Image (cartoon, rainbow, N blue to C red):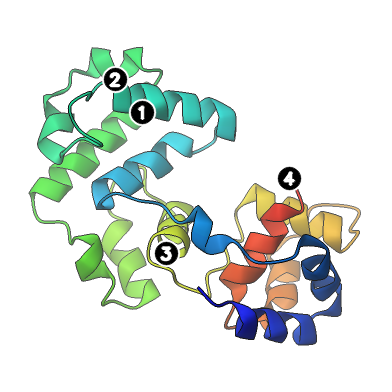
Amino acid sequence: MDYSTAIAHLKTADPVLGAWIDQVGDCLLCQDQGEGDLLFTLCESILYQQLSGKAAAAIHRRFLELYPDRSYPTAQDLLNTSDEALRGAGISRSKVVYMKDLAQKVLEGLPSLEALEKLEDEEITQTLLPIKGVGRWTVQMLLMFRLHRWDVFPMDDLGIRSGIRKIYELSDLPDKKTMEKLGQPWKPYRTIASWYLWRSLD
């Protein structure tokens, strides 16, 4: 994927971010893109909520090990799995409820990723927010890492806020107003800007 237009825009629009982009080098966002269907993608996001990447990755691995015969479970597989088995993989009680609610909604006709691709970002958000445990951040991760939307800015993400604090040398984590003002010049490439902000924490 060619990010050269986006990077040229960001460097011109924001010299501070531009200097950081020069330091990091090429944008490898396309290498971070996820796989699997909507159920798999949203289950992964739910499992990663409020956990460190390392802890979440271990739980996600144990979750997939419950289904040794396939790459990832179907909605029916998930509903057929006992709560005890899911809890045994390290999944919290509330997340078991969220994942089963999601599986039920998939069976009831939740749109596929292919169907969602035809919708605008906000339409996708409104379609998915009624699912238990799926908030705006979860939808934003889907937009960025599965649907390749280039202008998503997850302002509630602690990594994004920490990255801004670091790069712009702020004394505290930025509030939403500060972030909106900073992010304004990055449009329509705020996903790419966000990727670089995350890299500042590596």
**Residue 66: image x %, image y %?**
25, 21
Query: From mark 1 to mark 3, how far is it between C-alphas?
Result: 24 Å
Closer to the chain start, of discs 1 and 3, is: 1
**Residue 163: image x %, image y %?**
76, 55
Residue placed at 40% from the left, 26% from the top?
A: 61
Q: Quarter of the image holding residue 145? A: bottom left
- Residue picked out by circle 4: 202
Marks 3 and 4: which is nearer the front?
Answer: 4
Marks 2 and 1: which is nearer the front?
Answer: 2
**Residue 159: image x %, image y %?**
67, 49
**Residue flagged by tag 1: what amino acid is it?**
Ser
Query: From mark 2 to mark 1, how far is it between C-alphas?
Result: 11 Å
**Residue flagged by tag 2: what amino acid is it?**
Leu
- The image quadrant where one finds the C terminus is top right
Q: How many marks?
A: 4
Q: Is residue 154 above or below residue 37?
A: below
Left or right relative to 58: residue 29: right
Query: From mark 4 to mark 1, how far is it between C-alphas?
Result: 30 Å
**Residue 176: image x %, image y %?**
68, 64
Q: Is residue 65 above or below residue 99?
A: above
Asked whether residue 132 appears in the rendered view, the answer is no
Left or right relative to 138: residue 78: left
Q: Is residue 68 above or below residue 88?
A: below
| SS under mark 2 | helix
| SS under mark 3 | helix
- Residue picked out by circle 2: 86
Closer to the chain start, of discs 2 and 1, is: 2
